[in-house]
Amino acid sequence: MIERKITVNLTTGLQARPAAKFVQEANRYSSNVFLEKDNKRVNAKSIMGLMSLAVGTGEEILLVADGADEEDVISELTAFVSKEQ
């Protein structure tokens, strides 16, 4: 299992379209992937779960992955939320 704290640099945070793209990317991997904010953990492969966190720009989140391709999914999703758009 890998955990990584990251800061969301997306202009709109993880709302609407970026959230949908994030979930699509997470679903490309077989590992279990979770996102945590303010001690609330949700399945990162669920758009409803992700939207319930209301992650805004500049907020710190914890990304957790557990599985065969955990390193790849953590790297990909970290790069996604870290880039400025």
Image (tube, grey):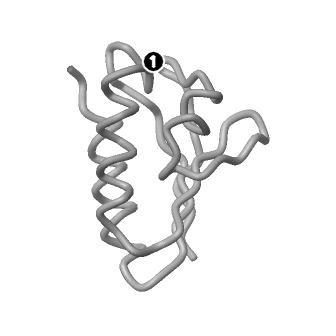
Residue holding disc 1: 57
Q: Residue furthest bottom?
A: 68
* x 44%, y 20%: residue: 15
* x 67%, y 36%: residue: 37
Q: Give residue 9's position: percent from left, percent from top.
A: 36, 25
Is 70 drawn above or below residue 79 in the view shown? below
Q: Residue furthest top?
A: 12
Is 12 drawn above or below residue 39 in the view shown? above
* x 28%, y 41%: residue: 80
Q: How many marks?
A: 1
Q: Amino acid at mark 1?
A: Thr
* x 55%, y 24%: residue: 55
Q: Which quadrant would the N terminus be assigned to in this image?
A: bottom right
Q: Give residue 85's position: percent from left, percent from top.
A: 20, 20
How many residues crowd around disc 1 within 10 Å: few (fewer than 14), some, or many (20 or more)?
some
Camera-side residue of 72 and 33: 33
Q: Give residue 76's position: percent from left, percent from top.
A: 28, 56
Is 81 drawn above or below residue 10 in the view shown? below
Is 56 drawn above or below residue 45 in the view shown? above
Q: Give residue 22's position: percent from left, percent from top.
A: 35, 41
Secondary structure at numbered mark 1? loop
Q: Residue furthest left?
A: 85
Residue 19: name its quadrant: top left
Image-based side of 59 in relation to 11, left or right: right
